Amino acid sequence: MKRLFKNFLKYRYLLRELIKKDIKLKYRRSYLGILWTLLEPLFTMMVLTLVFSGFYGKSDKTFPVYILTGRLLFTFFSNSTKAATKSIRSNAGMIKKVYVPKYIYPISTICSNFIFFLISLIVLVAVALVLGVYPTKYVFLAVVPILNLLVMTLGVGLMLATFSVFFRDMEYLWGIVLTLIMYCCAIFYEPKRVIKTGFGWILEINPLYWVIENFRDAVFGRPLDMHAFAFSTTFACVTLVLGIFVFYKQQDKFILNI
Amino acid sequence: MSKTVLSVDHVGMKFNLASEKVDDLKDYVIKFLKRQLMYKEFWALKDVTFEVKKGDRVGILGLNGAGKSTLLKCVAGVLKPTEGKITTKGVIVPLLELGAGFDKQYTGAENIYLYGAMLGYSKSFIEEKYKEIVKFSELGDFINVPVKNYSSGMKSRLGFSIATIVEPDILILDEVLSVGDAKFRKKSEKKIKSMIDKNVTVLFVSHSIDQVRDICNKAILLEQGHLVASGDVEDVIAIYESKISEN
């Protein structure tokens, strides 16, 4: 344990360099650069609002904030797990030549996505203020679902990174699973519509849905839903422990399979 | 008198050579059900034991496929041996494949920091040595150009300059470096010589007996993963040469 920690300290500069690299390279050679982190969610929100409130004739003024809260969290989860899945294979060249703790690859890509996510929260703040959703004292509780989401993503990312070394199919499979998860997160519809039809259990078993609910509680000024909190925290911790376990068990075999 | 800096203790490295490569789930399931998942075991190294004292320069001899590169990778920590244990003391600098850790889209300057971090250098250390690295690599203004536009010679020059900027305790060399043009090769050989003079421990793989004789004082001989001989360089070379003429 102590050795692990010392090793981490030694390579924390590398972790920083890798995160910096992801961020620097993502928008290099694009004219608007890092601005895209703000523009992309803003435009998607407009499209989704147009489709789901314009076409369905809904008139809730704060609906865009509702969509944005769900989508920002989901995008972070989706982007970083996808990147983590590929992280070991895309760094195969380095893994074969230089010794570096391997967890650094999935973790650095998740961290850089997390930074993009934090930046994109600016859009949420701006849209919320424009549409009259003002922060209350509950807004500080937004930290809870965000941390849960990060822990959950790390766990899932480590597992996916491990699996995809042995089975390439994982990359494609996970893309499909993500689509399924997206529709089960109540991002652009209200949960009561699903519950009414008797499929509410799909939401109930989806930890990401509970994370988003907790986040919406904080944004819309409601106290934290304790059930959602308990469920998502438990899930997050279990996945992280499992992810670390699976990764550590298999990491020495990575090099023989990439 | 001098202490052991590297000890290789009954090290074995097993590879599974899948008779057919199984790459995806479908293949795996089908082969598994048909019980066709045949693995051929292959020991690239078996029961290798030796020790290296500080300041020793050890040549590793052997024919192709004897396990020399596998051994170096195990020492460098890239491969984890299936059995046995390797203990090392101090900073290891592997000059295996130079510039393997470069990011193509990054410029040379950015890559110095990235690659340096990968070798475990600290930020302040790289900042301090940055100018020296650029100067030694002779890249000049090209340092601000993305590495994807570099020639292979430029890439390995930069890789060499970054890797050799530290003073290692153990230096790992796989074949002698043919880095860049004749002029740079002379310079890099001089650099390595100067490192050797500073009482660095060297592990050196080469097919050229003359080079081994030139650099090393000790040697080991590998044959199909087994350690056949170890000792003073001249003795081992004699055994190696007699083995070659036997064939």
Image (tube, coloured by chain):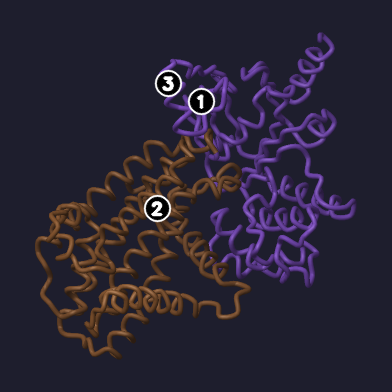
Q: Residue furthest right?
A: B182
Q: Position of residue A25 (x, y in %)?
A: 57, 67
The residue lying toward the viewer, choosing from A13 and A243, is A243
Q: Position of residue B11 (x, y in %)?
A: 52, 24
For the residues marked 2 and 3, what is the alpha-carbon distance in whole angstroms?
41 Å
> Which residue is at a point 21% across and 78% down the rendered structure image?
A219
Q: What amino acid is found at the position of numbered circle 1 in the picture? A: Asp
The reply to the same-chain question for discs 1 and 3 is: yes
Chain A's colour is brown
Q: Residues within 10 Å of mark 3 (few under 14, many from 20)?
A: few
Q: Position of residue A222 (x, y in %)?
A: 12, 77
Please report the residue visible at 22 percent of the width from the left and 82 percent of the height from the top. Answer: A60
Q: Which mark is residue B193?
A: none
Mark 2 — residue?
A6
Vertical order, A133 against A250 (above or below): below
In terms of sequence position, does the residue under pointer 1 or pointer 3 come before the other?
A: 1
Residue hosting label 1:
B9
Tell me whether marks 2 and 3 sit on the same chain.
Answer: no
Secondary structure of residue under mark 2: helix
How far apart, in angstroms, are the residues tagged by discs 1 and 3?
Answer: 36 Å
Secondary structure beneath label 1: strand
Query: Which is nearer the eye, A18 or B79?
Result: A18
The chain painted purple is B
